[in-house]
Every structure is written in structure tokens, then in C-alpha cells.
Amino acid sequence: MKKPNGVSGSDLLPMSLIGCASHDVVEILNKQKQDLHQLIVTADSIQDDDPPWRFRKIHIHYQAIGKGLDPEKVGKAIKLSEEKYCSVYATLKDAIEITHDFEVVED
């Protein structure tokens, strides 16, 4: 989000993606009895330089903060969100390159 006074309409696309994925990941980790305290999710995107400024790539970064989080379970939760639950991801995956990484931080 590069606008100092808010977001542009096109910023809502990656925001929708990370919102959908975040919800899924939190729900999955809670079901796995992981002690998640906070999930910070950001996205960087690449768009064309000329109108209509089509998105080419969205990269999502997950930062899972908690006590004794299992990195394998965090990775699995992200994968389940992408492959099974997130409707926004399912809609975009054939049109845009979507990548992710994650880190687990002990709280």
C-alpha cells in the first residue's frame, strides 16, 4: 500500500488475498492446538507499468508468533489454505503468480 492517505482500489486485491488466507491459517492452527498469539501477514505485488496496471505477481509473507509453534504445522496450514480453503487464492492462482514464505517467532 503505497498511498500515504489510504489504499487505492487495486490495493484491495492483495488485501483480499491475505485476509482470506489469514483467516484460514488462524482457524487451522487453532484446530491443531497451536498456541498462536499473533499472525502478521503482508503482501508485495508487481503490476504492469502501463494501464490497466495488471497484477503479475503477489508474494505473501506470514509471520506466526506464538509459544512452541511447530513450523511444519504452520507450513501445512498455509498449504491447506492455498490448496483447499481460500476462495480468493483459488480465483487468482491461474491468473497471477502467487508465492509465499513464512517465519515462526517464539513469543
Image (cartoon, grey):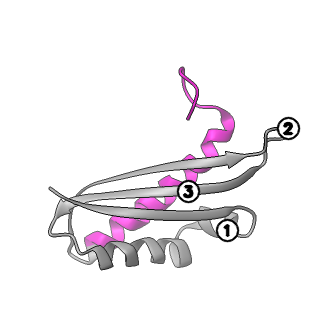
Question: Which residue in the structure is indicated by mark 1?
Answer: 93
Residue found 26% across the figure and 78% down from its top: 32
Q: CA distance from mark 2 to mark 1?
A: 22 Å
Determine the main secondary structure of the stretch shown in magenta.
Answer: helix
- Circle 1 sits in a helix, a strand or a loop, which is it? loop
Foreground disc of the pair 1, 3? 3
Q: Amino acid at mark 3?
A: His
Lower sequence index among marks 2 and 3 = 2
Judged left or right of residue 9, residue 104 is left
Lower sequence index among marks 2 and 1 = 2
Q: Give whichever of 63, 33 is nearer the camera.
A: 63
Q: CA distance from mark 2 to mark 3?
A: 21 Å
Question: Which residue in the structure is indicated by mark 2?
Answer: 51
Judged left or right of residue 75, residue 56 is right
Magenta span of residues: 1-30
Q: CA distance from mark 1 to mark 3?
A: 12 Å
Lower sequence index among marks 1 and 3 = 3
Q: Position of residue 23 (x, y in %)?
A: 41, 60
Residue 59 disc label: 3
Q: Amino acid at mark 1?
A: Lys
Judged left or right of residue 87, residue 18 is left
Residue found 43% across the figure and 71% down from its top: 78
Q: Residues within 10 Å of mark 3 (few under 14, many from 20)?
A: some
Q: Position of residue 44 (x, y in %)?
A: 56, 48
Q: Give whichever of 42, 24 is nearer the camera.
A: 42
Q: Are marks 1 and 3 in contact (CB under 8 Å)?
A: no
Q: Amino acid at mark 2?
A: Pro
Q: Residues within 10 Å of mark 1 (few under 14, many from 20)?
A: some
Residue found 50% across the figure and 54% down from its top: 18
Q: Position of residue 103 (x, y in %)?
A: 33, 62
Quarter holding the N terminus? top right
